Every structure is written in C-alpha cells, then in structure tokens.
Image: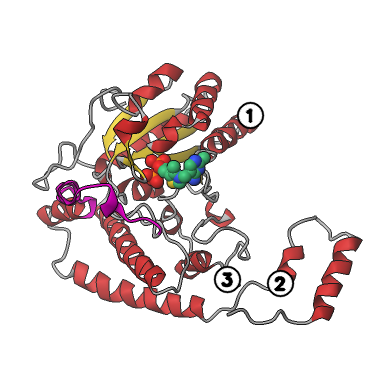
C-alpha cells in the first residue's frame, strides 16, 4: 500500500495543480472523471432545489465528497459489486446507469426499477451491480463482506466494495464485518468517507481513535489513509485495493479524509452545529477545483469546457426531470409482483379484489 496506514495521508494532487506521481490514466479517462464530478455537482444542486420546491421528498448530497465515489466507478470492473452508504449512489451513473432511471428512484414513481418500494433516493440497480444503501447505519458493511465471501467460495473473480461514513465505524456492524473479512481473507474493499461529521456529532466525539484507518490494524487488514478530496490519490489507492482483492490477497480498508460541504441531508441545518470558518477552509480544498487546476495545467481542459457542460448537462437534466415528473405513481397492482416465483391463489384473489375496487381515490 502507498502510505503510512496509521497517520500518513496519501496525496497525488498538489494545491498548485501539480502532481507527485503521474496518474496511470489516459487524457480521455481524466477528462471523463472530471466531467462526472462536475455533472454530479450540477445534478445534486438541482436535487436540493427540487426538494426545497416540494417536488421530491428527500436528498442527501455528496457535495465535497465526489472524489471517492467517482474514483470507485473508474477503479472497479463491471462485475464487481458496490454496497454504498448515503453518498455513493453516483457510482451507478459512472457505470452506465441511465439518468432518467436514476432520477425515477429519487421520485419513486412508475419509471422506478424498484417500483417505488424503496425509500426515495435509495438508488440501486441489478444492471450495474449496485445494492441499495440502508437508512440504518452500517448493515451494508457485513453485506459487502458476505458477497465477497460468496465470490471467494464460488471462485468468481468479483470484488465487493462496501462504503461507510466515519460514524459507521463506531457501529458493531463495522467491527463484525472487518473482523470476518480479515479472518476469511475475502475479496472486499471497505471504504470509509471520513467527512468529519455524523450529522451534528464531530468525529472526535464518537471515536477516541487517532485515525479511522488505524482501526484496520486490530483486524489484521491493511489500512490506508488517503486525501479524499484528491481523486487521483483515491483512484490509485482504491485500484490497488481492488487488484489486491482480485488477486486473492484479501481485504483492505481505506479512509478517505474529506468534508461534507452541504447539510447531512435535506432534513438538516448544519449552521446549528458547525462554523462558517470551518466550511470556508474546506471550500478551498474543493475536489472538483483541484482536478480542474491539474487538467488546465496539463493543457487538456478547454477553457469553455465548464460553460458547455453546464449548458449541455443542465439541459439533459431538465429533460430527464420533465420525463420523470410526467410519470404516474407506481401501479398498485405491482405490489403482487416479485414476491413469489409464481403467484399463489390467495394473492390472485387479492389482485382480483383490488381490480374490482377500481382506482384509488386521488390523494391531496
Ligand atoms: C443504526 C442507526 N443509528 C442512528 C441513525 C441516525 N443517523 C442517520 S445518519 C447518521 C450519521 C451517519 O454518519 P456517518 O456514518 O459519519 O455518515 P455521513 O452521513 O456523515 O456520510 C445517524 C446517526 C441511523 N440511521 N441508524
């Protein structure tokens, strides 16, 4: 691994736009990474506005934390599985999930592949091997380790990536999962996005551990601490961990040190518990801007790129939102689907009763 697992902080992108190690990515890949980061920033700004307008119910933005999920999208293969926490849904878009279907899960309507059965904004899709995140903190970590163990038993060359916030590393699920991962040497990559806050609880109030990465030492798992606002560093570390896992060398634990720029979710007001000075200091370390400076210094980012992306992706987003908002609620009859391999007689009867009752009265 690339840095001191206890206290070091692995960085590639320097503040002036230079790099300490040249990335092993083509110019096209670097530009694609940048485009994804910017698009997610644009999309999430719009989602928070839609929530404020009462058009969607809930959104948890990853603004400031774009680097770890986008790097993961680039570092994994299509057959790897992702078990996200709240702020990594965007990996699905990097792995090719269509924007309209993604937004339909924010609304939970009839275009939603999950038929509106999940909580809104809990995106997931079989076609990109991404499991829904859980509103409970932590269960996705043992799920990721379990999937990795299954892959190992079956001999599939599949890696499972499990995400969590810093708060989740104080949960029993984290300790159970990483212990199991270490003992059974499963092909899992566990990634903690240490954004310094668990809603209103600062990291130092919920763990006495000097770093999050050092917790891996207790379980015999290699731990690494990486600058989570540096996408090139995140990519290198996550890729190494994925390759290690795929080569049968066991799990890794990565702490990405970053910051949540916005509210915990649209149900939160961060001005109640943190200072403007703290937020402003982290704004200077913006991960999107850091990559932009590097690409500009290398001469591979056209001056008009941002402006064009804002216009083009903004229009694509507006069209997608319009299409999703035009869709109706999930069909009530769909509650009988996907429960049994073939529908039993008593559900057939209930379906007939529902049809006979006619359409549900309109809700106001
Ligand atoms: C088991 C459980 N306990 C408490 C909560 C309430 N809760 C929701 S989010 C959250 C903080 C999570 O913080 P962290 O794991 O650091 O992730 P972040 O949201 O900062 O990305 C808490 C305590 C919950 N959802 N589940």
Relative image position of residue 93 (x, y in whole percent): 43, 59
Q: Which numbered mark, 2 or 1, is in the foreground of this view?
A: 2
Q: Tell me the distance, in whole angstroms, between the alpha carbons under discs 1 and 3.
A: 38 Å
Q: Which numbered disc flags the more N-terminal residue, 1 or 3?
A: 3
Q: Secondary structure at mark 2?
A: helix
> Mark 1 against mark 3, which lies toward the viewer?
3
Decide if residue 242 is in sight here. no
Disc 2 designates what residue? 332
Q: Position of residue 167 (x, y in %)?
A: 40, 37
> Residue 172 location, x and y as percent?
51, 29
User: What is the C-alpha distance between the residues marked 2 and 3?
Assistant: 11 Å
Mark drawn on residue 153: 1
Residue 53 figure quarter: bottom left
Magenta stretch in the rendered image: 267-288
The residue that label 3 is drawn on is 109
Secondary structure under the numbered disc 3 in the rendered image = loop
Q: Earlier in the sequence, mark 2 or mark 1?
A: 1
The answer to whether the residues at label 2 and label 1 have Cβ atoms under 8 Å apart is no
């Amino acid at each position: 691994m690339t840095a001191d697992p206890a206290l070091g902080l692995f960085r590639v992108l320097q503040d002036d736009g230079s790099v300490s190690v040249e990335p092993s990515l083509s110019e096209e890949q670097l530009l694609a990474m940048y485009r994804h980061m910017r698009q997610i920033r644009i999309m999430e700004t719009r989602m928070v506005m839609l929530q404020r307008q009462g058009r969607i119910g809930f959104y948890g933005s990853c603004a400031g934390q774009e680097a770890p999920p986008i790097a993961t999208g680039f570092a994994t293969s299509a057959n790897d599985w992702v078990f996200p926490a709240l702020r990594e849904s965007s990996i699905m878009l990097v792995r090719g999930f269509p924007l309209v279907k993604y937004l339909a899960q924010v609304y939970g309507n009839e275009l939603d592949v999950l038929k509106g059965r999940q909580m809104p904004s809990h995106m997931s899709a079989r076609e990109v091997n991404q499991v829904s995140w859980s509103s409970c903190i932590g269960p996705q970590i043992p799920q990721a380790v379990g999937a990795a163990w299954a892959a190992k038993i079956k001999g599939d060359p599949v890696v499972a990536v499990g995400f969590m916030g810093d708060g989740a590393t104080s949960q029993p699920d984290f300790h159970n999962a990483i212990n199991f991962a270490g003992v059974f040497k499963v092909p899992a990559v566990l990634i903690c996005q240490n954004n310094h806050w668990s809603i209103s609880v600062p990291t130092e109030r919920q763990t006495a551990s000097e770093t999050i990465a050092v917790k891996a030492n207790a379980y015999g798992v290699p731990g690494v601490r990486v600058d989570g606002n540096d996408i090139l560093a995140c990519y290198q570390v996550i890729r190494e961990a994925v390759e290690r896992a795929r080569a049968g060398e066991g799990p890794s634990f990565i702490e990405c040190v970053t910051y949540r720029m916005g509210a915990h979710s649209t149900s939160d007001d961060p001005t109640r518990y943190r200072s403007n000075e703290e937020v402003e200091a982290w704004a200077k370390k913006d991960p999107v801007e850091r990559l932009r400076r590097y690409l500009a210094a290398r001469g591979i980012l056209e001056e008009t790129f941002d402006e064009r992306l804002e216009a083009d992706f903004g229009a694509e987003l507006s069209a997608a939102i319009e299409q999703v908002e035009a869709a109706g609620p999930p069909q009530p009859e769909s509650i009988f689907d996907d429960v049994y391999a073939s529908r039993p007689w008593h559900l057939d009867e209930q379906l007939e009763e529902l049809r006979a009752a006619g359409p549900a009265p309109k809700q106001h």
